Amino acid sequence: MSRAAVVRGLGAVVPPDAVTNAMLAERMDTSDEWIRTRTGIGQRHVVAPGVATSDLAVDAGSRALKAADVDHVDLVVVATTTPDHPCPATAPSVAARLGLGHVPAYDLAAVCTGFVYALASGAGAVASGLAKSVLVIGAETYSSILDPTDRTTSVIFGDGAGAVVLGAGEHDEPGALLEFDLGSDGTLADVIMIPGGGSRQRSGGVPADPADVYFRMDGKRVFRAAVQRMAGSARVVLDRAGWRVDDVDRFVGHQANVRILRAVAEELGLAPDRLVVNLDKVGNTSAASIPLALADAAQRDELSSGDRVVLSAFGGGVTWGACALVWPDIAVF
Ligand code: UT7
């Protein structure tokens, strides 16, 4: 039987500068009350000028390596929507800066589902024997792609990074990634998009519309699809794991909007107190969202070894994915 990928350590980081709702209300037509009631977000963190996604990824990655008490891995996967450059990938430079030598390293683009996709990719590498250990990082600097005049996105997204080290182990040990469900629907590609900067808009560096370099989201359509897909994907992994909804101790959903998380819980028949919520402090950090939520819950003692955990995410593409695991006794930095 193939080896299981087992979570051995977790690290997470947000940049020091927080932008509160009140600070946003000073520069655009919004309010603390609107943002809190519509999203549950109270603040988000943003990087200082000159800080890039790889800087956050290196910080989170080194914390995860320290938490796992290892100084080497066989593979690095960086899930991100905001790479340092369109080309090359960010992961090789992250691996080099972490002193990991000439290991394979690649980026994975699944927007807010990126971390779950990257976990599955790392688990596949372990199961196939390609790697015995994998550093999986979700890292984002959305502040670099948000239209500063767009209140519908500026109030939601924040910067941050989280990482886990996966090791090869047994399927019945705590931390083993037990079941996955992944999916996509490219017919909805337009609901979350940066229109410019890719091969579709060959404008010699000058976008058709200056705003095309920025991230755009059709919030209402995303909201509906996110609830349906996050609940559906969670249901699939519950079935595959042989767990009932009541068996779930912690549901760690992508931190998009607290209303989405509550609607997913309702759809599943999950008690709302099982939801892990940290978006009030960090906003929606896309591919970094799930590891940041895990780290926050662990540090607040809301996540303990032995807890049955379901991760579930939805993002641009559109993409979705879920994973079931029993939380291990690991360090979190
Ligand atoms: O991470 C990837 C996945 N992303 C998501 O899951 C995000 C999903 N979508 C959402 O979370 C929500 O759709 C939003 C938070 C983006 C928007 O909430 P909503 O309840 O769907 O609001 P809405 O777009 O229907 O807008 C309601 C009203 C509108 O005004 P009118 O037309 O009713 O007069 C908007 O113009 O709120 C207005 N509005 C705002 N007002 C104050 C939109 N953004 C803001 C704002 N501040 N920031």
Image (cartoon, grey):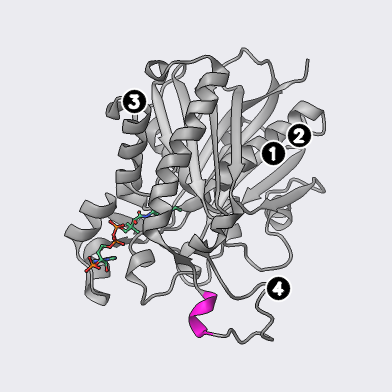
Query: Do the numbered discs 1 and 2 sit on residues whose CB atoms are within 8 Å?
Result: yes
Q: Main secondary structure of the magenta part?
A: helix
Nearer mark to the viewer, of 2 and 4: 4
Say which residue label 4 marks: 199
- Disc 4 residue type? Ser
- Disc 3 residue type? Leu
| Quarter occupied by residue 149 | bottom left
Say which residue label 2 marks: 125
Q: Which mark is residue 121?
A: 1
- Mark 2 falls on what kind of element? helix
Query: Do the numbered discs 2 and 4 sit on residues whose CB atoms are within 8 Å?
Result: no
- Mark 1 falls on what kind of element? helix
Indicate the position of residue 245 as horizontal and vertical percent values.
40, 20
Residue 195 visible at all: yes
* Residue 210 drawn in magenta: yes
| Above or below, comparing residue 29 to residue 185 in the picture | below
- Disc 2 residue type? Ala
Cα distance between the residues tagged 3 and 2:
32 Å
Cα distance between the residues tagged 1 and 3:
28 Å
Residue stretch in magenta: 209-213
Q: Residue at x 36, y 51 (%)?
A: 282
Cα distance between the residues tagged 3 and 4:
43 Å
Q: Residue at x 58, y 56 (%)?
A: 187
Say which residue label 3 marks: 270
| Above or below, comparing residue 74 to residue 177 in the picture | below
Q: Earlier in the sequence, mark 3 or mark 4?
A: 4
Q: Residue at x 41, y 58 (%)?
A: 158
Cα distance between the residues tagged 1 and 2:
6 Å
